[in-house]
Image (cartoon, grey):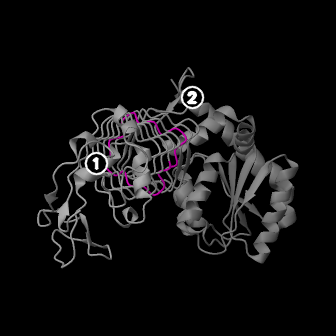
Amino acid sequence: MPEGRSAALPPAARPTSSSSVASVPQGAVSESGRLRQGAAGPREAPQRANVASAPANYLVPVGSRATWRRGPRIRSSGRVLIMANDEHLAIVKHGAEVWNEWRARPKARRFRPDLRGADLNGANLSGVNLTEADLRQAHLSRAQLVEANLREADLREADLKGAWLFSAKLVKANLSRADLTEAKLGMADLTDAKLSGANLREADFVKANLTETDLRGANLVGAYLDRASLIGTNLANATLEGCCIYGISAWDIKLDGAKQSNLVLTPRLEWPQIKVDDIEVAQFIYLLLHNQNIRRVIDTITSKAVLILGRFTVERKTILDTVREELRKYDYLPILFDFDSPASRDITETITLLARMARFIIADVTEPSSIPKELEAIVPTVAVPVQPLLEGSERPYSMFRDYWKYNWVLEVHRYTNLNDLLASLKERVIAPAEMKIKELEKRRREASP
């Protein structure tokens, strides 16, 4: 080819149907990305390369050393050739086999394919290698991209409605604001991918990997997330309405501002359907419904657990350890916490959760340290009997009187020493707590419609 000239792609090489893929034999594409002469029809007259009109991100080979540079205009004493966008599109339209053969060439690997705005609606590109390809605003509606490699591809604002992306590799791909309505992404790997603001209405993510995926502000109405893996997934401000989430694995997900409602946690064809409004709660509810061991554990905790709170200095710990052993003799499940150091927010939340599950609470207010803070969090919000213990004749701490207005806080049981406490435990600690439990249950029944 004469220097400074570029052969235009012949009309015969532009496929008009899927049958044209077979018309291009293997090896029809040269390393420079052009169709070889005679491979797909007659050759048009060569045209002079228009370097000045090349878009800013086209890649231009310069000189005999084939150094690839970016820029709209390259000046060099060597020969200048341009790989135009329409040439990329023409090659990919010949199918995955021809495209992948071309991309495997050393020279082709040096630049990023530019398929921005490409019309590939309904194209069969299963198994295609589009790693790092620029597909912004590309038209891929109903395209076959099964097992395609789209790692780090730029698909921002692309049209992928109804596209088939089963087992596709979309690791670190950017699909922000893309339209994937009814797209099939079963078993696709979307690890660390960006789908912020994407339209994922009724998209199929069955068994997909959504680890660390950015789904902020995404529309997931009616999406199928059955058995999908969501670990560290960001769903802030996303819309999760009517999603199928059977068998989902969700850990450390971010849901700030997310809209959640009518999440179906039963298999797709199982009736009646069970729906919840929180994706994290759904996993726990499903375990309760279908795991007898879990139900037995929960029943055991709520019917037998006794939460013991206090300051566990060496002297106090000896007393409360003995109380714990004594409670076991009465078939209770004592849960004992040591608050010798100031309680953190996380510990307070844990104690509050356990208090809600406990049958009753024993609170040693002798020489209090962190227990005032724990009772402040528990008593006003959790209607569980609280039995205070106090050794000797000293008075409870000053703020304790504020709790007398809650009828589930029992009278303080005073004792002189460990033997006195053990001798009176059943009659003065356990019995009043059990009586208060029955009283509270009766009130709940009377208050229920």
Q: Nearer the viewer, residue 7 or 441?
A: 7
Q: Where's residue 272, x and y in %?
A: 55, 20
Q: Nearer the viewer, residue 164 or 187?
A: 164
The number of callouts visible is: 2
Horizontal side of 58 relative to 209 (left or right) equals left
Q: Amino acid at mark 2?
A: Pro
Magenta stretch contains residue 195: yes
Which residue is painted at 72% across and 45% down in the image? 301
Which residue is painted at 53% across and 60% down in the image? 376
Residue 306 sits above or below residue 421 on the image: above
Q: Which residue is mark 2?
A: 267
Residue 337 sits above or below residue 137 on the image: below
Q: Where's residue 258, x and y in %?
A: 38, 47
Let me know if residue 40 appears in the view: yes
Res. 288 mark: none
Q: Nearer the viewer, mark 1 or mark 2?
A: 1
- For the record, the magenta segment spans 189-209
Horizontal side of 281 relative to 300 (left or right) equals left
Residue 399 sits above or below residue 292 on the image: below
Q: Where's residue 310, x and y in %?
A: 68, 66
Q: Residues within 10 Å of mark 1 (few under 14, many from 20)?
A: some
Q: Nearer the viewer, residue 109 or 34?
A: 34
Horizontal side of 17 relative to 335 (left or right) equals left
Q: Which residue is mark 1?
A: 89
Q: Earlier in the sequence, mark 1 or mark 2?
A: 1
Q: Where's residue 76, x and y in %?
A: 18, 78
Q: Secondary structure at mark 1?
A: helix
Q: Secondary structure at mark 2?
A: loop
Instruction: Report, in whole angstroms, how far the alpha carbon at label 1 lies from the one at label 2.
Output: 42 Å
